[in-house]
Amino acid sequence: MSAVGFFTDTSLCIGCKACEVACKQWNQLPSDGYELSGMSYDNTQMLSATTWRHVAFIEAPGAGAAGAQHQWLMLSDVCKHCSNAGCLQACPTGAIVRTEFDTVYVQQDICNGCGYCVPACPYGVIELGAFDHQAHKCTLCYDRLKVGMEPACAKACPTDSIVFGPVDQLATKATARLAALHERGISCARLYGLDEGAAKDSSGQGQLSSIFLLLDEPRKYNLPEQVQLPQNSVAPGSIATAAVAALLSLGAALIFGRSR
């Protein structure tokens, strides 16, 4: 079965948060409260154990797509379901698995709440819930996929900003959409998760199953320009540690030899 995922076109997002509401409703996630956060019109603020889809409102100074001096950037962020998932690699209990849809899924009955997966995710997606101290994130509506239904967020999106389907088909759709925007003079448009830093093989992250069309640099959307899995530094770090230990041993041997 081919991998499935999302193509999120931020140029079509109107910030209605229907995807957030649908995600919470279907997965029975608690409310994060209705307090004003000071972050524009955003009260959920970030992805968390209780917010698996997050619509960010970003007020950015400077020329927008239409030449305005002030622009709104909106992004419905979600788990990237990476082909080389840092959270899955870091999990010591096998609680995080890859499903038959090539998505990354946390088995709550196996998770022991160790938290190793949290720093292993370069996107800050996964979090331990304060209510049960277990890891939680987007499941890509695994229960809906098993019965042939699309994820709740994509179903609820009124502008088709969120499109669900096979990743290879989404990549073709994203490339065509990017070309269309460039033809219309929107040169700031770019793809993330397909031909940008997060998808480069040198990062070790591999292909993302969540592709985004952005209207500015990834950092404006709080997305990393370059991704490096923590696990990639284990081997170089071990070699460096061994080299330092060898040098210290040699130095100690020389000092001990001279003292005799």
Image: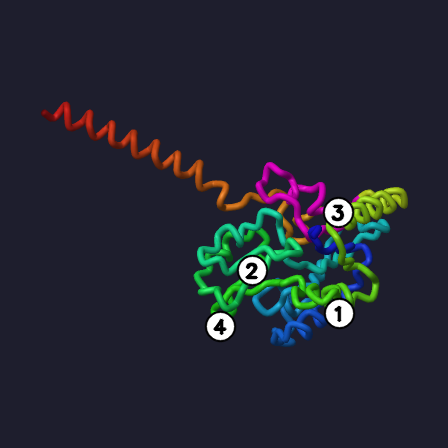
- Point out which mark residue 198 bears: none
Q: Name the residue beneath numbered marker 3.
A: 168
Task: Reply above or below: 75 against 176.
Answer: below
Query: Which residue is denoted by mark 1 in the rendering?
Result: 18
Q: CA distance from mark 4 to mark 2?
A: 14 Å
Mark earlier in primary sequence (1, 4): 1
Residue 126: give its label.
2
Of the two numbered discs 3 and 4 in the rendering, the one whose residue sits closer to the viewer: 3
Distance from Cα at disc 3 to Cα at disc 4: 37 Å
**Front in this rendered view, residue 27 or 224:** 27
Mark 3 or 2, nearer chain start = 2
Amino acid of disc 2: Ile
**Residue at 76% of width from left, 63% of height from top?**
154
Nearest the viewer among 111 and 59 is 111
User: Between marks 3 and 2, how big is the CA–CA gap?
Assistant: 25 Å
Find the magenta span and give its range.
188-215
**Which part of the image, by quadrant, shows the C terminus?**
top left
